[in-house]
Amino acid sequence: MVRLALFAVLALSLLQLATSLLLEVGTLPAVRWAQRLSPLDHRPALLLTELDPEHAEEHWRKIRQVHPRYTAAWIRLGLDQERRGDLREAEATLRSAAEGDRLFPPRWALANFYFRQGQTEMFWKQARLAAGVYEGSLTGVLALCLRVEQDPLKLLQRLEPRTAVARTELMRLLLRERRYDDAARVAELVAQSKARESGESLLAACEQASEAGETKAALGFWNAAVGHGLTAGRWLDPVRGELLADGGFESLAGGRCFDWRIAKQDGVLWRAGRPGGVRVELNGRQAAVLVVARVRMPVERGGRYRLRWRYSAEFTAGAAPLGWSMNGGEAAGEWRSQARGAEAEFEFEAGPRDLVEAALVSRPGRGWSRPEGRLQLEWVRVRRVEKAQSVSGHL
């Protein structure tokens, strides 16, 4: 008995070796011989689906018989049946695959089948089941769902993804499609998770939208992050006059979206002030044209605004004065090189813009030296005005 068992094991090993060698050869005759030698091995039939496409369905059925848990065979057979127009058989095959394997691939294959056939309700049922068992990114699922339902909030209601990450993925997908307003509608749901990654995603979305000139959407991302404590700063609303995210410099400049952006170069040192405000130190070796800090502000089109600030300064004699440049224009406003607790202001018009950028700049001209010394900027305020009361800056 022992010898018989050893012989059987040896014979089986030789058959498996011969089968593997024939499969490595990879020609149609060799693979057919491999199938004859090992009729219970699904690998030869799998290769034959490619080498003998005219009889692909027969080979897929063979795989299903010898390896009934090989879900890919059921899916491929269903797709081949659909391609031939046998829709009833295709649906039955794909449903059998989904019932036998409750993981993502067969459920998603069935959802795609219903999508192609225009069976919307059946599509949502299978898409919801697929999303409920998938562990990875749902971006592909969401992209197809957007072709069925354009409203992102209704999409989420129908899909019912079990992870909050799916909301962020949907927001990013909408941003890639440049659907900024729709992406902003998802921002509140993204912020509700209060995860650090959510805050980063919202700030990145805010940055992208503001760069694209989509100010309304940018405000949606920013306010969602601020409202849920995912970033420092104030809620912004140009209608209510809330234009500056951090006019008192209460937090370290983050440089994202509506936050202050500071110069990062040799010769410039930016420090948090006490109490509040910031201190900027220049050593005279900075760039000739220097943008010390800049900030974006949402405004109402056609509005007139007054920018006011409080500062202390101590610069060397002959140093070029600092000024506020609006959207890269000429500097406006008066800065004294020697001052303590001074206040100054100037006015500007938004014109057709709903987003402006104020920059604190130094542009030495003939006879001026590069600034050397320190500046304490306590606060900056921007208010809408009805009539001009000081020097105007037109954008």
Image: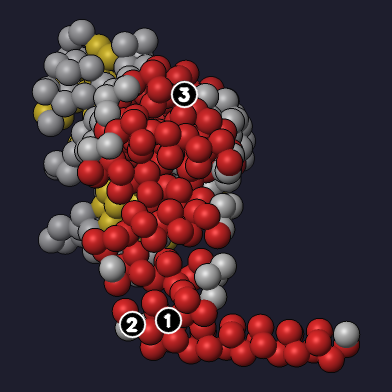
Q: Relative to 261, does residue 39 appear above or below in the rendering?
A: below
* Residue 16 position in % (x across, y down): 59, 83
Q: How much space separates mark 1 and mark 2, taking CA atoms?
A: 6 Å
Among the two numbered marks 1 and 3 on one chain, the one whose residue lies closer to the N terminus: 1
Which of discs 1 and 3 lies nearer the camera? The answer is 1
Mark 2 in CB contact with mark 3 (< 8 angstroms)? no
Q: How much space separates mark 1 and mark 3, taking CA atoms?
A: 44 Å
Among the two numbered marks 2 and 3 on one chain, the one whose residue lies closer to the N terminus: 2
Alpha-carbon neighbours of circle 2 within 10 Å: few (<14), some, or many (≥20)? few
Which of discs 2 and 3 lies nearer the camera? The answer is 2
> Which of 251 and 101 lies nearest the eye of the viewer?
101
Q: Relative to 385, does residue 97 appear above or below in the rendering?
A: below
Q: Determine whether the residue tagged by mark 1 lies in a helix, strand or loop.
A: helix
Q: Name the residue furthest right.
A: 1
Q: Identify the residue shown where x is 40% and y is 79%.
A: 31
- In which quadrant of the rendered view does residue 185 lie? top left
Q: Is residue 262 visible?
A: no
- Residue marked by disc 2: 29
Q: Which image quadrant: the C terminus? A: top left
- Residue marked by disc 3: 125
Q: Is residue 136 visible?
A: yes
Q: Identify the residue shown where x is 81% and y is 87%.
A: 4
Q: Identify the residue shown where x is 16% and y is 61%.
A: 367
- Residue marked by disc 1: 33
Q: Relative to 341, does residue 321 appear above or below in the rendering?
A: below
